[in-house]
Image (tube, rainbow, N blue to C red):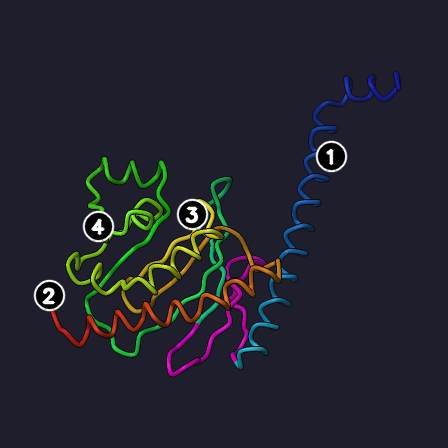
Amino acid sequence: MSSFVEFVEHYPRLVFWAVTAVVGGALAQWALVQSRRTAANLQAVAQRLGLEYFEAKKTGWASNQIVTGQRDGRDVTFHTFTTGSGKSRKPWRAVSVRPRTVGGLTFHFQPQGLGTKLKELFGAREIVTGDAPFDAAWFLETNEPEFLPAALVPEVRAKIMAARADAGRDGNFKLETTSVRYAERGTFADADDCTRFEQLLPLLHELADIAEVSAERGPA
């Protein structure tokens, strides 16, 4: 033991870099295992739903893993992505449905919390539906504040509330540009998460229905 302590005292930089290499290698191996599990789980999703799996390569060895195709006449996509960089880099998993007709409606449902309170302080306008439990659970933003609350009938609100139980602090629904998307922090390395995201497809199709109704109405 004393000889090891003496070695560390004499060669602190060497020990530091050795430990760094070991930790870095372990993290890289863990990331590789997670990536392979995600690939296997998404390939299983593609097979179950009759969709296609592929990887979109990024810089280095990393890639975004994607399942895409058509379900019920609409484009459907399961995919992973990252936000931030370096130590602030965060992995996300998402499933999206593209409305057949795209109009100008946008919306964003986020779990109520500190982040949404800060958004409100900086000028974000919260839209309420009049359903107190729903409004307490979700911070809703939209560019059609009269149409969307009316379109969120009780059955749809109930399904969104059911999703809230598993959404965590960052699971959110969003319609922006061409797709209705549900996303939350994490990967698809756990098969149970894949199943849960598959079960969200009917709800996303219903939200896509709302987007299509808005598009048929034309500009608000």
Badge 2: residue crowd in 10 Å (few <14, some 14–19, many ≥20): few
Task: Read off the residue under disc 2.
Answer: 220
Mark 3 → mark 2, Cα distance in angstroms: 30 Å
Give the residues in magenta. Answer: 51-76
Q: Circle 3 — which element?
A: loop
* Of the image marks 4 and 1, the number of the one nearer the N terminus: 1
Mark 4 → mark 2, Cα distance in angstroms: 16 Å
Task: Read off the residue under disc 1.
Answer: 18
- In depth, the one of 2 and 7 nearer the eye is 2
Mark 1 → mark 2, Cα distance in angstroms: 63 Å
Q: Circle 2 — which element?
A: loop
Task: Read off the residue under disc 4.
Answer: 127
Task: Read off the residue under disc 3.
Answer: 170
* Of the image marks 3 and 4, the number of the one nearer the N terminus: 4
Tell whether label 2 touches label 1 (CB within 8 Å): no
Q: Quadrant of residue 114?
A: top left
* Of the image marks 4 and 2, the number of the one nearer the N terminus: 4
Position of residue 131 measured from the top left corner of the image (x, y, whole percent): 27, 52
Mark 3 → mark 4, Cα distance in angstroms: 19 Å
Badge 1: residue crowd in 10 Å (few <14, some 14–19, many ≥20): few
Q: Main secondary structure of the magenta part?
A: strand
